[in-house]
Amino acid sequence: MDIRTLWNERYTKGLPSLETPDPFFIRMFDQIISREFPAGGNAIDLAAGTGRHTLHLAEAKWKVTAVDISDVALERLVEQTPDVQIRTICTDLATYQLPQAAFDLVVLYYYFDRSLFPAIIQAVKPGGLLICKLAVGKPANPIALQEQELLQLTNMLDTASYEERPVKDRGVAEYAGRKPF
Ligand SMILES: C[S@@+](CC[C@H](N)C(=O)[O-])C[C@H]1O[C@@H](n2cnc3c(N)ncnc32)[C@H](O)[C@@H]1O
C-alpha cells in the first residue's frame, strides 16, 4: 500500500487524537508566536493532516499553506472552514520544493524526514520561527529521530524552547527556534 492510501484510510477511519491543537503548540502560540507576530504573517504547516494547527493560525489571521500527502485529510480541512487565508497543497514532501525565506512560521508536527531539514530551515524568513514536535525513536531504529538530534538538525536557528521526554515506550521532542536576522 502506498503512503497516500495508507493515510487516506487512517483519516477515513478517523484520528481523533489529531483533531485538537497540541498543548505545546498552544503554549508556543501564546508565549512566542502571537507576541512576535501580533498581526499574523505567512505560515506553512508541513504534513498538516486535517489542519488542527493551520486552523488555529488562520483564526488568528495568519495566511497558512497546509501541505500533506493525504487528499482525504486536506478535504476535511477545507470542509471545516471557508477561510480564504488557507491554501492546501496535496503532495509528497519528499519531492515538494519549499520556497526559500518565504515563511514567518513553519510548523512541523509528527512527520520526520531528516533530509528535509536544510530546506525547512531555508524556508524560514530571517526572524521567523520553526515550531515542531516529533517522536524520538529507539537507537535501534536509525530512521527515527534520535535523542538530541533535533538540536543538531536545527543548529542554524536560535533555540527558544526545547524539551525531550519519554512518552509511553518512546519519547517526544518539542522544539521552537528562531532564524537569526
Ligand atoms: C501523525 S500525522 C500528523 C498530522 C499533523 N501534523 C498533526 O499533528 O495533526 C502525519 C501526517 O503526515 C502526512 N504524511 C505522511 N507522509 C507524507 C509525505 N511523504 N508527504 C506529505 N505528508 C505526509 C500524513 O498524511 C499525516 O497527515
Image (cartoon, helix red, strand yellow):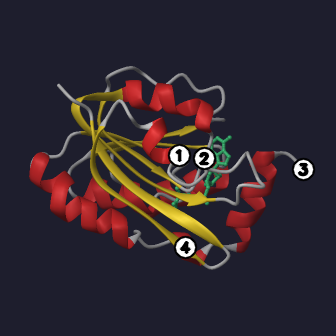
Q: For marks 2 and 1, give the CA distance.
A: 12 Å
Residue labelled with disc 4: 166
Tag 2 near tag 1, CB within 8 Å: no
Q: For marks 4 and 1, give the CA distance.
A: 15 Å
Tag 3 near tag 4, CB within 8 Å: no
Q: Secondary structure at mark 2?
A: loop
User: Few, some or many C-alpha atoms within 10 Å of disc 4 (few <14, some 14-19, many ≥20)?
Assistant: few
Residue labelled with disc 1: 149
The image position of residue 96, as x and y in percent, is 59, 27
Amino acid type, label 2: Phe
Q: Secondary structure at mark 4?
A: strand
- Which mark is drawn over residue 159? none
Residue labelled with disc 2: 112
Q: Of marks 3 and 2, which one's residue comes earlier in the chain? A: 3
Residue labelled with disc 3: 1
Amino acid type, label 4: Pro
Tag 4 near tag 1, CB within 8 Å: no
Amino acid type, label 1: Glu
Q: For marks 3 and 4, give the CA distance.
A: 31 Å
Queried on whether the Cβ of the residue with tag 2 lies below 8 angstroms from ligand 1, the answer reads no
Can residue 46 be seen in this snapshot? no
The image position of residue 55, as x and y in percent, is 36, 59
The image position of residue 87, as x and y in percent, is 42, 40
